[in-house]
Amino acid sequence: MKHTKHTWAELLLPAVWLLWMAPLCAAGQPADTLALQRESTHFSLYSTAGDIPVLDTLASALEANYARITQHLGIQMAAKTSVRIYPDVKAYHSAIGYPDAPDWMVGGTWNGTVLMMVSPLHPGSIHTYASLMQVVVHEFVHIAVAYARGADGFAGLPRWLNEGFAQYEAGQTNDRVRASAAASLRAPKPPTLAQLDEASDMEFGNMNGYAVSVTLVDYLITTYGIDKLVQLIKAPASCEAIYGLPVSTLQEQWVAYMQQWKPE
């Protein structure tokens, strides 16, 4: 049923993105038949002819969020970001070299510089047109974060911080996600940040790591401001110098807040 699918997607969506943030093909960028179809101020969009009708909407979504994301990170990106839109889930999975991947894998980055995703016109069995409009913004956030961190890229960046910030900027925080995270944190043995960072991709998803991560980022931004959060992204080892508190204390504050959280 449509409502059931939408609810499932809202809870599962954050589990999509981390898997493909590392280079997808050791020999180089995956080969495909996509052609350059659109140019906007900051993006070059590649697709098949069948997906041309959705490219202006994707470009508008990216451009509408571009200034805020880059300003938050304090960067001016030197080149346009390439966006590769695959006609369906099967084509995307083939391009990334994982033909048997589950349908919830619909987007990622190649080498931290190229955005790759399934067309919103054919979102598959888990996602929706609307959710893929958030995916494209989420994936661009990862690219912008890698750019802001320079030569370090994603190395040394905590998984919860990377994923949580991308979800926050893409508008993937809502009461359903908060309720899911709160339930996880009320469990007898809630996931710790260390466990989330040490988990495999599948384990991270099974631990509800995406919902947990975005609520922590949201808490830190609401409580201490986005400037400190961005400083932490750029220098994760300097948490105590940035916040005046060790990460363990920040975690305790957030867990206490989430354990008492109720929707307004």
Image (cartoon, grey):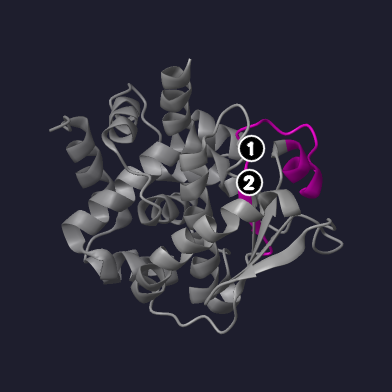
Q: Residue furthest left?
A: 264
Examine the rendering and report whether any part of residue 99 can be seen: yes
At a point 28% along the width and 58% down the height, the residue shown is 246
**SS for tag 2?**
loop
Is 44 situated above or below 257? below
Is 14 situated above or below 169? above
- Between residue 3 and residue 241, name the one nearer to us: 3
The span picked out in magenta is 90-111
At a point 16% along the width and 29% down the height, the residue shown is 262
**Residue type of the residue flagged with mark 2:** Ser
Q: Is residue 98 magenta?
A: yes
Residue 197 coordinates in the image, percent (x, y): 51, 47
**SS for tag 1?**
loop
Identify residue for label 2: 119
Q: Residue furthest top?
A: 1
- Between residue 56 and residue 169, name the one nearer to us: 56
122 relative position to 13: left or right: right
Q: Which of the labelled discs sits on residue 23, or is there none?
A: none
Residue 118 coordinates in the image, percent (x, y): 65, 45
**Residue type of the residue flagged with mark 1:** His
At a point 15% along the width and 31% down the height, the residue shown is 260
